Amino acid sequence: MRRELGINAGDTVMVDIDHGELRVRSIAKAIEHARAILRRYVPEGVGLADELIADRRAEAERE
């Protein structure tokens, strides 16, 4: 099962229960899944970190 999932002995995994099923994912797969969710709301090429920094700078200038 580890080979099928790309998980080596000692690797950190994410384990959760989804609709009564136990799910085990590698960290890489969990990150890939999270990025896919974010892409539904954030267009390609938009940098959230850059936007946050710009917002903070604008806020600091207003103070």
Image (tube, rainbow, N blue to C red):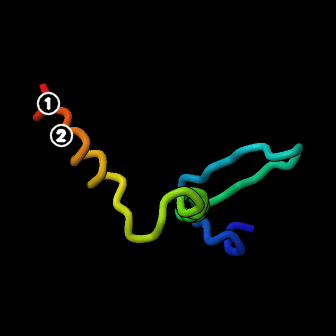
Instruction: Classify residue 36 as left or right of residue 53.
Output: right
Instruction: Classify residue 30 as left or right of residue 59.
Output: right
Neighbor class of circle 2 (other Cα within 10 Å; few <14, some 14-19, many 20+) is few
Q: Is there a contact, CB below 8 Å, between mark 1 and mark 2? A: yes
Whether 50 is drawn above or below 29: the answer is: above
Q: Secondary structure at mark 2?
A: helix
Whether 5 is drawn above or below 53: the answer is: below
Q: Disc 1 marks which residue?
A: 62
Percent position of residue 58, x then y: 18, 40
Percent position of residue 19, x then y: 87, 45
Which quarter of the figure is the N terminus placed in?
A: bottom right
Q: Residue at x 86, y 49 (%)?
A: 21
Q: Disc 2 marks which residue?
A: 58
Residue 7, quarter of picture: bottom right
Q: Nearer the viewer, residue 29 or 57?
A: 57
**Mark sitting on residue 49:** none
The single residue placed furthest to the right in the displayed view is 20
The single residue placed furthest to the top in the displayed view is 63
Q: CA distance from mark 1 to mark 2?
A: 6 Å
Task: Give the amino acid at mark 2.
Answer: Ala
Residue 55, quarter of picture: top left
Q: Residue at x 71, y 74 (%)?
A: 4
Percent position of residue 38, x then y: 54, 57
Q: Secondary structure at mark 1?
A: helix
Task: Give the amino acid at mark 1.
Answer: Arg
Q: Residue at x 16, y 41 (%)?
A: 57
